[in-house]
Amino acid sequence: MPASALSIRPIITPAERETWNALAERSPVGHRHQCLWWMEPLERYGFRSYAIGCWNADRLVGGAHFRSYGVPLTRSTVSECLDGPIFLEWDKAWADDFVGGLAEMAGTARSMAVVIRDCPQEDVHRDMLGSMRRRGLTIALTRGPADAVLQLEGRSMNEIRSGFNHGTRQRIKKGQAGPLSVRWLTSAEDLARAYGAWIATANRRSFTDVRPWTGLEPVLRYCLDNRLGSVLGTFLDDKLLAAAFIVHTGKAAAYVYGGYMDGAEKYSPTHMLQFEAIRESLERGMATYNFGMLISEGQTAGRGVDEFKLGFGAEPRRHLDTIIWKRKPLLYDSIERFRRGRIGAGLEALLKRKVVSRGDTG
């Protein structure tokens, strides 16, 4: 099919939305960040969702889902594509048309910058970047982060377990021999209890990126009802000690949220959770299990979290470079310099708390 057959337009109609979600949920290139239902619950907190679809004749072959958030006092936004664009097939001749579609989206969203993070396909990344440069756009590249990824495909559970380090195996063995049990959580009450464990951990570690309950509960419900994920809890009798949220999209399982209640660390409850989540992911036919981003990068901070992930035999996999298209370079660079400063970081944290509070009162 010639490249001129490619049609690019926003995902708008119910039928288009259903087709796009099916692509993002079930296809080999799928990812939760590209699913409409993942982002749209955050609209009450000031985010806007934009999806661009690409059709080769009458077949949806790919596209990109963006989230846009307003920057105070600027009357503009930053638009981010996380873990995309995604394409079932790709022709380098499509790059110019696709970048043109990105430009239309950026204009609609009044974006000072368009940021593409963790693009999963090297050819799409390369050709898209080349088209942007041919257009003379102001582009910056930053090094992509590394995730801790455990290979599942082609391995048995015994083979996977043999790759755990000694400490991880011992903690799992101790938990399985003791009074702890792991349960799959589905009721509204149990999901709220799981969220309490995640917030308890976030508070201990001063995390600010855990979604508020009103923005997360519909996502949990959708995943459970459509077999796109699981919430697991470790219990001591009927007392919840720890919980984890795992999402299954495409061929990958991803550990999204996890945490334990204050005082529960002496039981090592999270090791049993991860073991059962890995086993379930293998049974569901997932090719990989992603523990999430490695955060220490040679620094002391976060090293314990990274060692926990790598203790399960996961290996670092680095994403492609982040692409930053600066549509308003002076404004964007000024905002970024301010954000990196001490005052800017404090104001950003305060703004996050206010936005979350506003959303939870609705």
Image: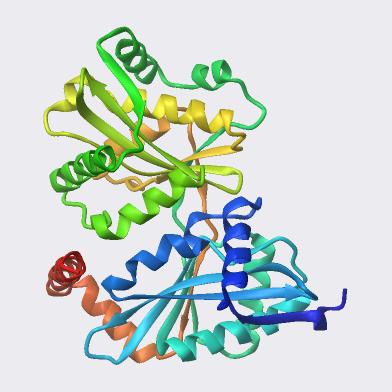
Q: Position of residue 184 (x, y in %)?
A: 38, 30
The tally of labels here is 0
Q: 167 and 20: which one is in front?
A: 20
Q: Position of residue 312 (x, y in %)?
A: 43, 27
- Dividing the picture into quadrants, the one containing residue 181 is top left
Q: 189 and 123: which one is in front?
A: 189
**Residue extending furthest top?**
177
Q: Position of residue 99 (x, y in %)?
A: 62, 82
Question: Is the residue 145 above or below the residue 283 in the image?
Answer: below
Q: Position of residue 226 (x, y in %)?
A: 51, 47
> Which residue shows up at 30% across the image and 14% down it?
175
Give the quadrant of the C terminus: bottom left
> Which residue shows up at 65% across the image and 61% down it?
122
Q: 139 and 103: which one is in front?
A: 103
**In the image: residue 239, left or right of residue 211:** left
Is residue 71 at all visible to an observer of this figure?
Answer: yes
> Which residue shows up at 34% across the image and 34% down it?
185
**In the image: residue 337, left or right of residue 57:** left
**Residue extending furthest right?**
1
Give the quadrant of the N terminus: bottom right
